[in-house]
Amino acid sequence: MSDRNRAEGWQHAKLSGHNNEKLIAELTKNSIEIQQRILDCAHMTNEKIIDIKYGGLCEINVDCIIDGGKTKSKTDMWLILESGKKINVSIKKDEGGQVFLIGIDRFINGYEAQYGEKIPSDVVRAIELYFGSADDTLSIIESISGINKALEKRKHRLVADSLKLYNSNLYDKLLSWFNSKIANLFDFCFSRGLSKNKEDWAQIVWYKNMIGENPFDTMIYLPDLLEHIPETAKYGTVNGGSTIQLPFGFVQWHSPRKVIPGNIQFHHSYSKMVDILNSTR
């Protein structure tokens, strides 16, 4: 795919996503049954929805937790309740795709700020090597007999096999940290992002597509899943381990504009999310 076609693809996905949000917001406004489903999902059965708003092309930025600036909220649709409370809904129209794209330093700083804990220095080192922001990455690639040097040089990062060759302790610590913090990482990706204020965090993920691409219609109340995320993160097997497979999707290096260092890109998976949902029942 050419850069132009890739850019056009991203633009199409963004516009179709906004169109889907608009259609879902209109459906919700006009359907008492849908409104009740959302209230039931959020365990707010005695509430009443009095207004519905959605982001779409006019999405607004919210307060960011790490730099005093603004950031994108994970919420796509806001349901205003008679009591003054809100239900925040994140809408997914596809079975998989990007759920969180973030720079390496912002990931580290944002995670620490959201959850009030320091990421251990050896884990930070492993993150920087695996996702490519360490200053000595290229010299390490040259010094070890990795199987995928061309990819690693191009992306300025170590894949899992090379990280293990360089330092098996870092290889183990990175995966161990992902598993020990898997509920926080799930929450970070789907609910909080870098949003500072709780009122901006998503509470429900609604897998629904009204533009004829996917037939699903599944609502998931995110807090219900937090205690049920299995610690099953593992390195992928392709390209020497260029991804970390997660119980709710996977995470990889990504740089849409070919900028070095790249970013950390989390992907969601509808089938994996449903598996976790079913485990709560």
Image (spheres, rainbow, N blue to C red):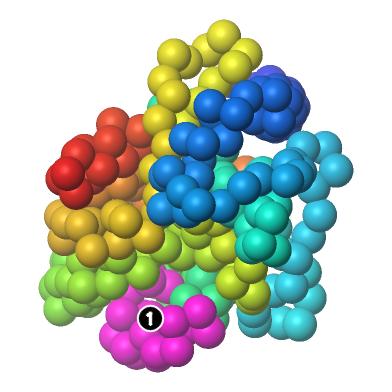
Q: Is residue 11 above or below residue 179?
A: above
Q: Residue at x 28, y 31 (%)?
A: 271
Give the side of residue 39 with respect to residue 258, left or right.
Answer: left
What's the amino acid at mark 1? Val
Q: Residue at x 37, y 60 (%)?
A: 223
Give the side of residue 125 with respect to residue 202, left or right.
Answer: left
Question: Residue 196 location in percent, x, y?
Answer: 64, 76
> Nearest the camera: 230 or 112?
230
Mark 1 closeness class: few <14, some 14–19, many ≥20 residues within 10 Å: some
Question: Residue 183 location in percent, x, y?
Answer: 30, 65
Question: Residue 256 location in percent, x, y?
Answer: 62, 44
> Nearest the camera: 270 or 166?
270
Q: Which residue is mark 1?
A: 124
Which quadrant: the C terminus? top left
Which quadrant: the N terminus? top right
Q: Which residues are magenta?
A: 112-130
Residue 201 visible in image: yes
Secondary structure under badge 1?
helix
- 126 part of magenta stretch: yes
Q: Residue at x 53, y 65 (%)?
A: 192
